[in-house]
Image (cartoon, rainbow, N blue to C red):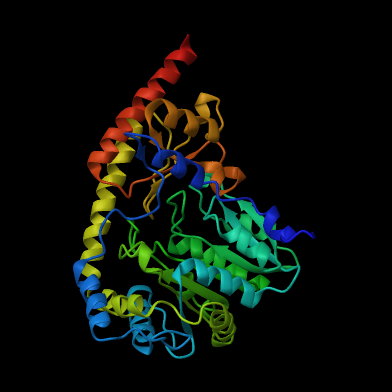
Amino acid sequence: MRNPLSDQVVALKPSGIRKFFDIVSEMKDAISLGVGEPDFDTPWFIRDEAIQSLEKGRTFYTSNSGLKELREEICNYLKRKCDVEYEPLKEVVITVGGSEAIDIGLRAMINPGDEVLIPQPSYVSYEPCAIMAGAKPVIINLKHENQFRLTAEELLEAITDKTKLLILPFPNNPTGAIMERKDLEAIAKVCIEKDIFVMSDEIYSELTYKDEHVSIASLPGMKERTILINGFSKAFAMTGWRLGYACGPKEIIAQMTKIHQFAIMCAPTTSQYAAIEALKNGDEDVQAMREAYNQRRRFLMDAFREMKLECFEPFGAFYVFPCIKEFGMTSEEFATRLLEEEKVAVVPGTAFGDCGEGFLRISYAYSIDNLKVAIGRMKAFIERLREKKEC
C-alpha cells in the first residue's frame, strides 16, 4: 500500500504544550500553570444572549463573512479602542477563532517560496501555518535584554528580497511582552520602506497593563498593509465559543473569505449573536477581569523577586516568562522535574521556539489561591536546587 500521509504534515512538530497537560490530567493533586485559558466563566449576559438566540430559532447559517450586525459592532469596537476604521461589509471576516484567521490569512497571501518573518518566542501555530501555506518561515529570535520586543534593527536584518509578510504577535504569548507606540512606529517605518505586509495578532489587546494597547494598523501608511486579527477567547472569556475575526484591505479579505467559504462555510451562529452582545455591553466585565489578572501578575512578580528568580516585567496577556538558566538545566528538564517532584505544571520556553531555551511560560489565568500554592511548591523546588548547587 502506498504511503497515505502528507510528507509535509508528518514533518511538522507536534505542539510542545500538550505533553504536560496530558500528564497533569492523570496526576492527583497536581496544579497546572500551563493553560492559556481564562479561569472566568463567560459573563452571564453574553451567555443569556446565546440562549435567547437558540430559543428564537436562530440556528441557520450566516453569510460566509459573518452576521452583518457583528461585523458592524467589530468596526465600532476597533474605532473606539484602536482608532482604526474598517468597512464592515468589505474589510471584515468572522472566523472560527483567531487561529483560523491566521491560517486563511497566510494561505490567501502567500505564494510558494515567499518568506514570512516570525518573531519567537511566540504562539505555536504561526510557523506550521506558514509552512502549510507554502512559505519559508524566517525566525527572528527575540532577546531577553530587549524585554522580548521586536526592534527595527532585528527586522531589517531578517528582510530579504523574498520577504512578503511579518507576523507581529503582541501582546505576546508566551512572554507577556508588549510593543509601545514608539516601538511600532519604528517597525512601521521599515515595513513601508521595504514594502512588506503585516499580520498583527492582537488577541490579547484588552489584556494590557501599561497605558493603552496600540494597533500597528492605526499608524500612518499601515492600515493598507496590515491584517488585524483578534477574537473573543481571551478578553471575554469565550474560548469554547470559537470566534475570531480578521480585518484588512478588501482584496485580501475577499480571498480569505473565499477560503473560509470552502473550508468552514461560516462561524458558529450562536457564538456570533453572543459576540454582538459582548462588544456592545462587555467593557465593564473586561475591565474587571483585566484588574484581576493584573493583581495576579503583580503577585507573581513579587514572588519571583522574593525567591530571586530573574524575570522581566511583562505588561500584556496573562503570562510571565521567568529565566531558569542559573540551574544548568534545559527548560524541558526543569519543567519535567518540577512536575514530578512538586506536581506543578509549567510549559518549557522551547515550546515557543528555540530561543525560549532557559525560560518557562507560567500562566496566571488562575485564582490567587491556586497561584499561592503553586508558587510555594516552586519556591521549595528552587531552594532544593540551590542548596544542592552550593554543596
Q: Position of residue 85 (x, y in %)?
A: 41, 83
Residue lying at the far front in this picture: please name it. Answer: 1
The residue located at (36%, 61%) in the rendering is 234
299 left or right of 251 in image: left
The answer to whether residue 6 is above or below residue 146 is below
The answer to whether residue 22 is above or below residue 334 is below
Looking at the image, which is closer to me, 175 or 374?
374
Quarter of the image where one finds residue 192: bottom right
The answer to whether residue 368 is above or below residue 165 is above
- Residue 307 in view, yes or no: no
Looking at the image, which is closer to me, 385 or 180?
385
4 left or right of 280 in image: right
Q: Where is residue 235 in the image (x, y as percent from the top left)?
A: 33, 63
- Residue 314 in view, yes or no: yes
Quarter of the image where one finds residue 279: bottom left
Q: Position of residue 46 (x, y in %)?
A: 24, 72
Q: Where is residue 148 in the image (x, y as percent from the top left)?
A: 51, 49
Quarter of the image where one finds residue 25: top left
The answer to whether residue 343 is above or below residue 239 is above
The residue located at (52%, 77%) in the rendering is 264
The residue located at (55%, 27%) in the rendering is 329
Count of numbered circles in the view:
0
